[in-house]
Amino acid sequence: MKKLLLMPVFFTLVLFYSCNHDENVNTEKVSENKNEDHLKTIAVTESVAFLKDFQQQQSTQKNANFNLTIDFKSIQQIDITDTDAKLTVVKAETGLDNVDSSILQIRINGELQTVLFNLIPEEGFNNKKTGKVIDRYDEFSGAVVISDLKGIIKNNFVYKSGNLLGEVKSPGPDPIPLNNVNVYPKPKPSDISLPYIMPGYQFRGEGSPTNYASMGVAFATYYTTAMVNEIEKRITDKNLTPCQKAVLEKLKTNKNVDIARMLARLGANSPYTLNITTADFDEPATIRYTQKSPISRFDYTMIISSNYTDRTSLSLAGNILHEVVHAYFLSLQDQVAAQGSSVALTEFPALFEVYVQQKAPTGAWMTPNLQHKQMAETYVNAIAAALQEFQTGNTAATSIQQKYLDLAWGGLYKTSVFDKTFPEGSADRSRILNRLHCEQQGADAQNHGGERQYPIGSKCEDYIKSK
């Protein structure tokens, strides 16, 4: 067969937004109302029965495209963001060369929907080298092909170096078998839709309305979850105090917004190693390359100061989350370096600029100031949600309280977006800095003028006693 192009599904969040505006409105309603009937979970027993029935039919019928082998032991149900529904995901084998496939099932508007998700790298990008496309998705070139279980194509998209080029249009109105798909030569610009992402919003490129959008979003969440969970596993600690260790473990196990989910909100998409230790240090916490000469890219060390003995457990949690994000920003810089740049940035404000440049939309309609504000709010909301759950234990909160937003905004202190959003002398700036100060000192504070702030976190010795 001819080599097929396909791409990893980490980016299918964009890809499956190829629906019309009306469907976009329906999907957004799901986000607003968890009782919406648009999406419903398929019971595992129902999925297994359906797939075994298909397998039995397949054994008695000749399939011109491929014979599907289903790995029933791999079945799992993946949370779909902002709904109570779950997507059923089952690994499968088509027998086609260098194709990574999964079956997706969910009920959409009362109808059982089943598709086969096929990841097909372009020639020269062999996922069999690692056994997992996910290990190299950030540099992936290829296509994603969505078919039915018999291999009839529903959608087909092309990626290059991790970037979506667009949808490959069928030459005619009829579906095409998977083993006949060939996306060479690269589609002409006039044939390519150019969807784009802005964090927190949903945009879709041109394309035919389908019911596969919800499954694509969920599968993108699945791969994102796999990636950030891998990052969380690579966070190791040694020599931490009992309080530091307890705070770190709580942040890893938050039910709704743990470290992994926080990184997912920020768009983390490449694994790195983070070693956490404690030492006599004049800052609450800091990040550095584990080995400075030569620089050990994608391998960082967080140092938590042992000197700030009066800070609250909430302040410590904020320090840890901020430095986890700092390490993520370092990994973005290292990705840039891998493409030929030799500049090794380490300071957070400069790395935040790297984050904005790599993650913010680039359309002319979006001014630099708006880009910074949008990305700052993404950072703030991700950290604040994790801090609120850490402190309150409430996993069902529908809104983030101001004090946790203030702590998160404090992490952007000394960046240009902080100064523009909260200028010198403003009440908001005073409140934020006083909140940081009182949690860091474990005592009420009014050092920056404005309203006096009082700590809401407990001292470390009290936090340990409460465990």
Image (cartoon, helix red, strand yellow):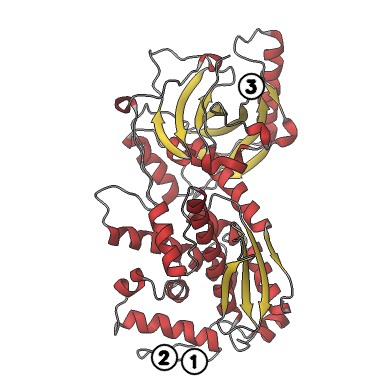
Where is mark 2, residue-wise?
452
Where is mark 3, residue-wise?
97
Residue 217 drawn at (x, y percent): 49, 40
Answer with left or right where residue 25 lies relative to residue 273.
left
Above or below residue 285? Residue 39 is: above
Residues at marks 2 and 1 touching, judged by CB atoms closer than 8 Å? yes
Question: Tag 1's secondary structure?
Answer: loop
Q: Quadrant of the N terminus?
A: top right
Q: Earlier in the sequence, mark 3 or mark 1?
A: 3
Where is mark 1, residue-wise?
444
Q: Residue at x 43, y 58 (%)?
A: 355
The residue type indicated by label 2 comes to Arg
Residues at marks 3 and 1 touching, judged by CB atoms closer than 8 Å? no
Q: Earlier in the sequence, mark 2 or mark 1?
A: 1
**Disc 3: CA contacts within 10 A as few (<14), some (14-19) or many (>=20):** few
Residue 258 appears anywhere in the view: no
The residue type indicated by label 1 comes to Asp
